[in-house]
Amino acid sequence: MMETEHDDKMIRCPKLGDEMTFSYCLRESGELPCARIITCWQAFFDVTKELKCVLTPEQWDRFTGAKPKEKVLSLIELIEKAKANK
Ligand code: SF4
């Protein structure tokens, strides 16, 4: 993954309760950024623009596609649970 001019900036991580650098957030999920990266950093600079610069199109698709997929899965689980409780 390419470096960015924001790599050394620090923020208090709500997940880990400690200060993290932007470069850590970029690699928090292995080769993909932390799922919360846009929420955490959007007040400081244009995170989406940075992500589009450093991620390959394939990584960007996986990053943006990861969340809706999780939602659909949890919806299916809820439906299955509701069926089981009938
Ligand atoms: S983007 Fe993720 S790792 Fe980085 S500060 Fe936010 S929650 Fe923590």
Image (cartoon, rainbow, N blue to C red):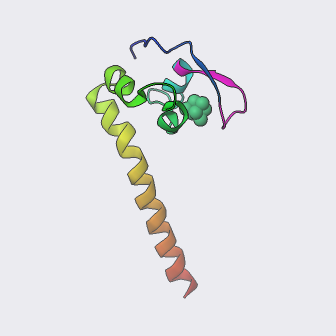
Kindly identify the residue that appears in the image at 43 percent across and 13 percent down: 4
* Residue 42 visible (yes or no): yes
Residue at the outermost left position = 57
Image quadrant where residue 71 sits: bottom left
Image quadrant where residue 59 sits: top left
Residue 65 on the magenta span = no
Residue 65 in picture, x, y percent from top left: 35, 45
Residue 7 in picture, x, y percent from top left: 51, 14
Judge by depth and name the residue closer to the eye, 29 or 19. Answer: 19
Specify the segment rendered in magenta: 13-22
Residue 21 on the magenta span = yes
Q: Tell me the quarter of the image containing the N terminus.
A: top left
Is 13 positioned to the left or the right of 3 in the image?
A: right
| 6 vs 39: above or below | above
* Residue 27 visible (yes or no): no
| 82 vs 73: above or below | below
Q: Tell me the quarter of the image containing the C terminus.
A: bottom right
Residue 61 in picture, x, y percent from top left: 31, 38
Quadrant holding ligand 1? top right
Which SS type dominates the magenta stretch?
loop
Kindly identify the residue that appears in the image at 52 percent across and 79 percent down: 82
| 69 vs 18: above or below | below
